[in-house]
Amino acid sequence: MAEIKIENLHKEFGIGEDRVVALENVSFGIQGHIFVSIVGPSGCGKSTLLNILSGIETPSSGSVTITQDNHEAEPGYVFQAARLLPWRTVMDNLLFVQKDHNEETRERCQRYLEMVQLGDKGDKYPGELSGGMQQRVGIARAFSIEPDVLFMDEPFSHLDAITARSLRRELHEMWRQTRKTVLFVTHDVGEAVELSNRILVFAKGGRLEDDLQIDLPFPRDPSNEEVAVAKAQVLRKFEELDLIAT
Amino acid sequence: MTTLVTKAPVSETGWRRVLGSPKTARLLFPVAVLAVWYFIYYTIDSRIFPTPQDVLGFMWEEVTLTSGVRYSSVAENLYVQFGVSLMRLTIGFVVAMILGTIIGLAMGISKRADAFFHDWVMAVLAMPALVWALFLGLALGFGDLGPIIAVIAAGLPFVIINVREGVRNTPRELFDMARAFDVPQNKITRHVLLPSLMPFFFAALRYAYAIGWKGLVITEVFASDRGMGWTIKFWYDAHRAKGVIGYALFFIIFAMALEKLVFDPLAEKAFRWRPQVDALEMAEGDFGAVTQEGFLLQESQVEEAVPIESMEVESKDG
C-alpha cells in the first residue's frame, strides 16, 4: 500500500524583504487507493508542493516520505502542459521514461496508449496531435511506468471544457482500474469534487486550511444534484476561509 | 417576352490557371530580368556591357575549358580556382563551427564566459568583411591562411550567438519532466538537450556557410592570387564584364545548389517532427535572407518563441 507522509513542510524563497513563504509548516498523510485533490487560489503553494514531491525543488525544512509497502515508492507525474518531447514519436515519449527496455515494455506502453484511446497514434509526433490528445499521452506516460503514486498538476486547466470533461472521466476510470494513490492539484473546485475522495484546501501563503471528505459514489456526474450540493458546500467553505477574492 | 440570361459562373480555364499560378510568377521574374538587361544594353552606349548570350557563352567556354584563358602562370581553370576556394571555405567553416560551438556553449552556460566574450563577439560582428580582407592581406600576404581566417572571422560570431541562444532557450520544463521521472543524465543529454539545440545549430550552420562564402570571396579579391574572388577580379582588371558576371553566377549557382542539395535535405531529416515547416525559419536559411537584419530578426523571434510556462509566484526563483 502506498503512503505519502508530509511533516512540517516549509518552503521559502528569497531573503530579507523579498522573502516569500510558499509553504508554511504543512503536514498531512495519504494512504492507499485514494484520490486526493489539493485546491486553492494561485500563489497558495500547490505547485511548490508538487515540485518538492517530484524532487525538482528541495524544502527549506520538514520532510516528505513516499513509500510503497515500506519501500521507497516510485511516483508518476502529469504536468499542466503535456511536456512531451516534440522530436520523439508518441511511443518513444512513453519509452523515454521507462526503466526497463524489452518487448514487454513496449507492450505495456501500447496498452496504456490504448487506455487513453490513442492505440493507433504511437508513431505520430506530438505536434501532429491536438492539445487534448497530447495531454492524454502525458497521462498514459505517467501510468505506463506503473507508479505507486501519481502526482498531477492541473492537467486539464489548458484544455477546453468538453475535452477536459471527457479526460476527467477517462482518468477516473484508469484510477479505478489501476488502484493508484493520486494527488491531484487543481484550482477548479468542481473538478476536485467530481474526482476526489478527499480535498485539501490551501490558502495564500501556503497554509493547509482544511481537510474535507467527499463521500459520494463514483462516477460523479457534475449535473447530479448531490454533486452540485457538495460543490456548493466546498465553495461555501472557501468563502468562510476568505479564499475567494471579492 | 423577356429572356433571362444567366451567366455561367466564371470558371478558370486551363491556360488562365497556368498564367495565374505562382509557378508562372516565379518564372516571370527571370524573364523580366532579361527584358531589363536587354533594355539597358540597347539604350546605353557601353562597350563593356555584355548581352546575356555573351555571359552564357563565356560560362560555357569556362565549363568546357575551351576559352583558352590561363589564369596566372600555371594552367589554372574554373575547376582549379573553385577547388582552391572550396578548400579554404571548408577549412574555415569547420574551424568556425567547432570554435563557435565551444565558445557558444560556454557563453550559454556560464555568465562569466558570456561577459568575457560578449563585447568581443559584437566587435567581430560589426567588423566589415572588407576590413578583414585588407587587414589579412597586409598581415599575412597572399597565401591560403588569410582567406581561411576571413571565413572563420565572418562565420564565427553567428555560430557563437546561435549556439548561445540555443543553450539559453533549452526547454526547462522538459528537463524537469525528465528529472521527475528519474531519467538518467546521459539519456537526458542525448534525447532532450541535443535535440533542443538542433534548430539553433542548423541556423548556425547555414549562417556560417553563407556569410563565410561572402567573406572568402571579398578576401580573395584583395588578399589572394588564386580562388573565385581572385578570378572575378582578374576579369575586372581585364575590363571584361562578362567574366565578372559569369563568375558571380557560378558562385551563386554553386551556393544555391549546396543549400538545396545538402542543407535542405539535412534539415528535413533532422526536423521531420515539425508539423509544418515554419516559413520564417525557411527564409532565414535561404541565401538571400542572410543579412545582419536576418540574424537580428531570428534572435528576437527566438525570444518570442520560448514558451513561458505559467508559473506561480513562488516558483520563480529556485
Image: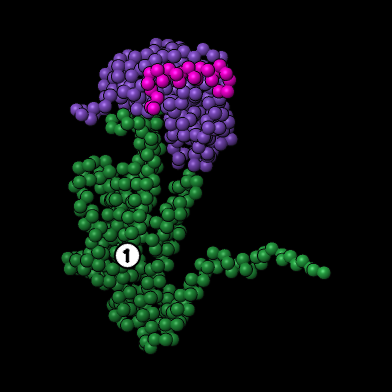
Task: From the viewer's side, name the closer residue of B172 and A184.
Answer: A184
Residue A39 in the image: state x and y as whole percent.
42, 22
Residue occupying image coordinates x 37% and y 16% = A209
Name the residue nearer the viewer: A41 or A2.
A41
On the image, the x and y values in percent for residue B32 come to 48, 75
Point out residue A159 in the picture as x, y percentages from the top left corner: 49, 34
Magenta: main secondary structure: helix
Q: Quadrant of the image for the C terminus of chain A?
A: top left
Residue B314 percent location from the top left of the image: 31, 29
Instruction: Tell me the chain of label 1.
Output: B
Q: Which residues are magenta?
A: A222-246
| Residue name at image x 44 percent, y 86 percent | B42
Which colour is chain B painted? green
Q: Quarter holding the N terminus of chain A? A: top left
Q: Is residue B207 rendered to the left or right of residue B264?
A: left
Pointer 1: what residue? B214
What kind of element bears circle 1?
helix
Q: Amino acid at mark 1?
A: Lys
Residue A236 visible, this angle: yes
Q: What is the residue that sits farthest to the right in this orientation?
A: B1
Chain colored purple: A
Asked if the magenta segment contains residue A224, the reply would be yes
